Image (cartoon, rainbow, N blue to C red):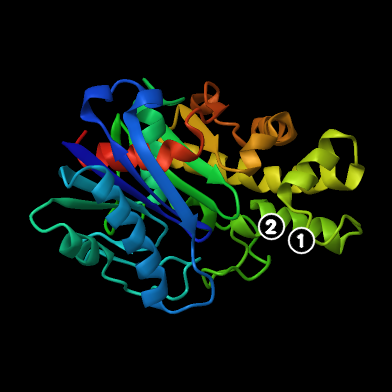
Amino acid sequence: MLTLCLDIGGTKLAAALADPAARADSAALLVYSAKCPTPQGGDAEQVWQALAALIADAVQAAGGAIAGVGIASAGPIDLAGGTVSPINIRAWRGYPLRDKVAAMLPGVPVRLGGDGVCMAVGEHWLGAGRGAGFMLGMVVSTGVGGGLVLDGVPYDGRTGNAGHVGHVVVDPDGRACACGGRGCVETAASGPSMVRWARENGWTAPAEAGAKELANAAANGDPLAQQAFRRGTRALAAMIASVAAVCDLDLVVIGGGVAKSGDVLFAPLRAALSEYAGLRFLSALRVVPAELGGAAGLIGAARLAGL
């Protein structure tokens, strides 16, 4: 029997089927996958219907033979209540996601986790985090998310929201954040935030240009684009140094769309981290690119479900 994996974010919804016979091989683990854009501007039911259609198609592809379900959802989440209130899906506030999915698959166990935790679990299991004892997994994309693996075990925290590193405050007088706070790392280091800052300071790329184009400009020597990345990576480095000091980390794995820019992101990030992470016990801290790409959350959800 197969495991159904779901990955829910503000940009896309994804469903996959994981084969337990391939649990040691990330390339073969997901035997089916499908995705669709997350409906924008609609009500809660529109978002649910889009996800329900993906679930129904996956169950049909599995011939109804589903052993368990793992859900990686953008947060905040409430593990005890099985509800989600993603910052980037405004229609879902206290949405009973676990129960809605369970109702489609009577008798099948359903496990819910934060998308950052599932990304970290996936990378720790079959990706760049294999063998790490104390790890932070991060996604730098339209937002900044994260999850922790401490002493080799995923750490959910009290409510399931441990590792929400995108909302570590790095500038007390900074911009208002969508979370309701101010000066969060996400306001400086997410792809849209870096693009916004670059435009405010004179970057004249076409209106449709985003983080990918900004990264290309930086790689080609555009000083303003490079400055935008330096500013964003300093915010990331300040956050990483703080979290590493609190959790005694040995590894940080970074994925997401912005991380695909390679050295444009990682070179200034490592340089800034060398300034902020001054404690001796952090001298061996490594920061590396993720290996599983967009499948990390789905793979982590499969692990969450018991693979």
Residue at the location (74% across, 53% down)?
210
Could you say where residue 130 lies in the image, as x and y percent from the top left? 38, 22
Report the residue at 85% width, 63% height from top. 200
Would you name the residue on which mark 2 appears? 192
* Local SS, label 1: helix
Which residue is more in the foreground, 13 or 84?
13
The amino acid beneath tag 2 is Pro
Looking at the picture, tell me which residue is in the foreground, 63 or 69: 63
Tell me which residue sits at (70%, 58%) in the image.
Answer: 193
Question: Mark 1 is on which residue type?
Answer: Arg
Q: Position of residue 294 (x, y in %)?
A: 49, 40
Left or right of 196? Residue 41 is: left
Using the image, determine if residue 109 lies above or below residue 154: below
Image x and y of residue 114, in percent? 36, 52
Instruction: Residue at the far left: name it.
Output: 107
* Residue 171 or residue 11, whichever sits in front: 11
